[in-house]
Image (cartoon, rainbow, N blue to C red):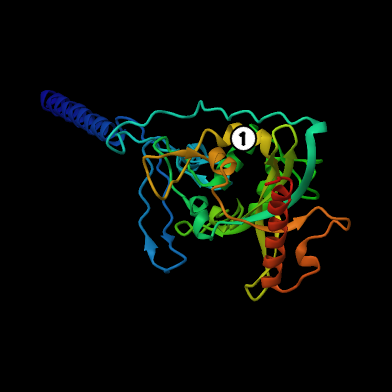
């Protein structure tokens, strides 16, 4: 009897040990399966994005692993644009990679203007100051509208050349409050007149729908400059017995527009002292509408008088323009032509035949 009882106890203990071992092994396997091999960072759940312009959902591409989209947007490099001196973001000037013609053109950026003949104060037998206006819409003034880039990528429009020279401080601009070159005008002041002040406007992102303030300003179109005003002096040199002309200043003219679109007036934007500007103009070619092979510079164009203009003022006791006492446009042109004829006849009257 005792042997039977001992045998039953031993079998019960063996079964209990086996059951405990199986339970521990199953719990160990469940624990290993539940633990991840490597903890992954939680990805932020993307919110659905709707285009406010169309009202339709937009699929936004996911950000790369380990990056924050907000941080990427803040650290994004600015676009490869630059300010060209006119106030408008443009691409960097592109130089021609091949010869644009049958032969390579020699650079002319090292040209210098020819010095003026010296006129002594005692040799000035007669002198007259006049103001003329060059209208680029005249047929003879078509080179002033040549809005292209040369092989080096530099724009050849005259207003762009002048603004670039002011920006790089090759010449100084003067305020149009007078034409005596008395008040220096900065490049920023000129751009404020051309494009207006920088202002903040509200803008809505078309993808995210986020509203934010963006700084902007109007763009300047150089083709809106239709006239240039020049101040010059005609002097009879007694030593050389010749009538000579010297340009003193050049001023681009900007138009003031009425509400109905008509032009109210044209006023100078700034004045440039022409003797200081001559070395700059000598560096740039001007378009020759008769022969592409025969090139000349802007300084040659002004010195050889390859332009047409009309007189708007002569030096007088009341310091007034022609349009202040003559209202009819045709009569103003005839009065300006009479001033030109008076200068021409003065030279002829000094000679004896």
Residue 45 place in picture, x, y as percent: 41, 50
Relative horizontal placement of residue 319, taking residue 253 as reference (left or right)? right
Relative horizontal placement of residue 98, taking residue 246 as reference (left or right)? left
Query: At numbered mark 1, what does the secondary structure look like: helix, strand or loop?
Result: helix
Kindly indicate the quadrant of the structure image that contains residue 48.
bottom left
Residue at the spot 36% in from the left edge and 37% down from the top edge: 65
Q: Is residue 296 visible?
A: yes
Q: Nearer the viewer, residue 221 or 10?
A: 221
Relative horizontal placement of residue 118, taking residue 301 as reference (left or right)? right
Question: How many labels, in total?
Answer: 1
Residue 263 place in picture, x, y as percent: 66, 69
Q: Is residue 196 visible?
A: no
Residue at the spot 40% in from the left edge and 49% down from the top edge: 290
Residue at the spot 40% in from the left edge and 43% down from the top edge: 43
Q: How many other residues sit within 10 Å of disc 1, few (<14), some (14-19) or many (≥20)?
A: many
Residue 71 place in picture, x, y as percent: 50, 39
Looking at the image, the residue that sits furthest to the front is: 353
Q: Nearer the viewer, residue 47 or 142?
A: 142
Q: Nearer the viewer, residue 170 or 260?
A: 170
Residue 211 place in picture, x, y as percent: 57, 57
Kindly indicate the quadrant of the structure image that contains residue 119.
top right
Which quarter shows the N terminus? top left
Kindly indicate the quadrant of the structure image that contains residue 309.
bottom right
Looking at the image, the residue that sits furthest to the bottom is: 260
Q: Which residue is mark 1?
A: 278
């Amino acid at each position: 009897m005792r042997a039977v009882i001992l045998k039953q106890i031993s079998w019960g203990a063996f079964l209990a040990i086996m059951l405990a071992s199986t339970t521990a092994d199953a719990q160990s396997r469940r624990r290993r399966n539940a633990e991840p091999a490597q903890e992954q960072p939680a990805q932020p759940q993307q919110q659905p994005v709707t285009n406010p312009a169309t009202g339709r959902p937009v699929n936004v591409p996911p950000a790369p692993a380990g990056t924050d989209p907000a941080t990427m947007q803040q650290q994004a490099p600015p676009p490869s644009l630059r300010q060209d001196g006119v106030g408008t973001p443009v691409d960097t000037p592109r130089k021609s990679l091949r010869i644009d013609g049958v032969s390579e053109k020699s650079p002319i950026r090292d040209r210098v203007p020819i010095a003026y003949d010296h006129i002594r104060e005692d040799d000035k037998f007669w002198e007259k100051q006049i103001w003329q206006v060059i209208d680029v819409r005249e047929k003879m003034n078509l080179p002033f509208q040549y809005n292209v880039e040369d092989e080096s990528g530099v724009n050849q429009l005259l207003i762009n050349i002048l603004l670039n020279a002011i920006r790089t401080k090759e010449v100084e601009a003067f305020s149009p409050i007078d034409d005596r070159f008395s008040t220096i005008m900065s490049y920023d002041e000129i751009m404020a007149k051309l494009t207006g002040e920088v202002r903040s406007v509200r803008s809505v992102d078309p993808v995210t729908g986020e509203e934010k303030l963006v700084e902007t300003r109007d763009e300047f179109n150089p083709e809106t400059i239709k006239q240039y005003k020049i101040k010059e002096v005609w002097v009879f040199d007694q030593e050389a017995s010749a009538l000579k002309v010297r340009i003193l200043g050049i001023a681009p003219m900007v138009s003031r527009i009425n509400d109905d679109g008509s032009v109210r007036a044209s006023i100078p934007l700034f004045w440039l002292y022409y003797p200081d500007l001559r070395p700059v103009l000598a560096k740039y070619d001007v378009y020759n509408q008769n022969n592409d092979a025969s090139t000349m510079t802007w300084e040659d164009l002004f010195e050889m008088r390859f332009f047409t203009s009309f007189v708007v003022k002569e030096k007088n006791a009341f310091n007034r323009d022609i349009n202040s006492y003559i209202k009819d446009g045709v009569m103003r042109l005839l009065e300006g032509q009479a001033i030109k004829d008076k200068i021409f006849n003065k030279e002829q009257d000094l000679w004896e035949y």
